[in-house]
Amino acid sequence: MLAVPPSDKALVPFVSVENMMRLVHHIGIERMLAGLADYIEEDFRRWELFDKVPRVASHSAEGVIELMPTSDGEVYGFKYVNGHPKNTREGLQTVTAFGLLADVGNGYPVLLSEMTVLTALRTAATSAMVARHLAPRGADTMAMIGNGAQAEFQSLAMKSICGVEAVRLWDIDPAATQKTARNLAGMGLEVVKCASAEESMEGAQIITTCTADKQYATILSDNMVGAGVHINAIGGDCPGKTELAPGVLHRSDIFVEYPEQTRIEGEIQQLSPDHPVTQMWEVINGTKQGRTSAGQITLFDSVGFAIEDFSALRYIREHIGGTDHYQELDLLADPDDPRDLFGMLQRAGPD
């Protein structure tokens, strides 16, 4: 639980993109991914304490802008995030984000942070946290289908948290695969560049799909998926955007974060509203079963949920202390007399 100390000043800690990158290097990326996974799992264990609503989304033909709020009763958090697949063609990020934590008791913000880098880290940490519960025992190879901005984070999270030793890369754009292979060189993984999605899945016990186009796509057809694998489907994250053939879904045991959101945005938007799914917090708490047999296909239909962002922000706030990897923003008006906001404004004027 995040304790929010009282403050006698209205300065808010702010973690910029530059400072976030410095913090990642200060901690170490694999250590940070493992730490984030632990924080996310800890908050999943107290899932029932949190306010939960599907994210508030504004959709357009080009993409989506979303707000993702939650609170554990003591701390409130939200993330602003966009998803615009066309951005890459214009030299822009597909996803950008920032987030905030606030003290429920007085409403004052206690942290403002970039979340473009942090979202990539927490998404990968969530994937690997789930995989350590659902992937087949001894899984050491992952197929990484879609080699965009998430690919390296996903690969390193699976390495540090699940013990994956080899990653097999494929993307419709060979340049993306070259980029990912180059970035993962020297990171302790065997990296194999593949010529097709089918080739990337050879010998893989974990299959991660992460493509960007906003459309009903079939990245994995039914006949591509054999028994006993764990599928980490993270690319379907808005209405009208999927990656898996319906046949794959019908053969899999499906695990989700928050069903009310996943049925709108995830792979299961292709299924009937009453199709059974299991919430991951129940698996983590031991009230529902995860993997039950060697031949079972487990599918994590991940769309991202606000509690994961809350966990990530909580991690950041608890790790910036004693560092210079943040700055203090004069974000809140703080008159000596709380009733005299106008007087504070007047006194700030020219003499």
Image: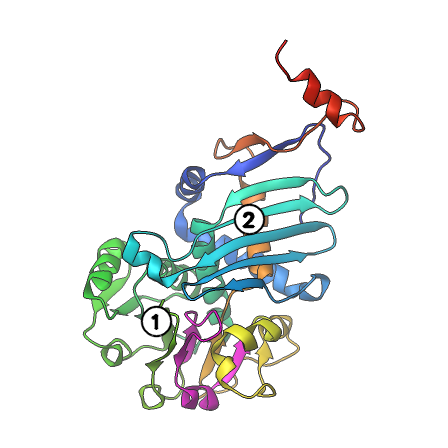
Q: Residues within 10 Å of mark 2 (few under 14, many from 20)?
A: many
> Which residue appears at 68% of the width and 63% of the height?
46
Q: Nearer the viewer, residue 262 or 341?
A: 341
Q: Position of residue 187 (x, y in %)?
A: 29, 54
Q: Is residue 334 above or below residue 106?
A: above
Q: Is residue 39 left or right of residue 159?
A: right
Magenta residue span: 230-256
Q: CA distance from mark 1 to mark 2?
A: 34 Å
Helix, strand or loop at label 1? It is loop
Q: Is residue 14 above or below residue 199?
A: above
> Which residue appears at 31% of the width and 68% of the height?
146
Q: Is residue 15 above or below residue 145?
A: above
Q: Position of residue 341 (x, y in %)?
A: 74, 27
Using the image, tell me which numbered label, if any, was put on residue 140.
Answer: 1
Which quarter of the figure has residue 135?
Answer: bottom left
Is 45 one of the magenta-colored residues? Answer: no
Disc 2 target residue: 99
Q: Amino acid at mark 1?
A: Asp
Q: Amino acid at mark 2?
A: Gly
> Which residue appears at 37% of the width and 68% of the height?
210
Q: Position of residue 24 (x, y in %)?
A: 42, 44
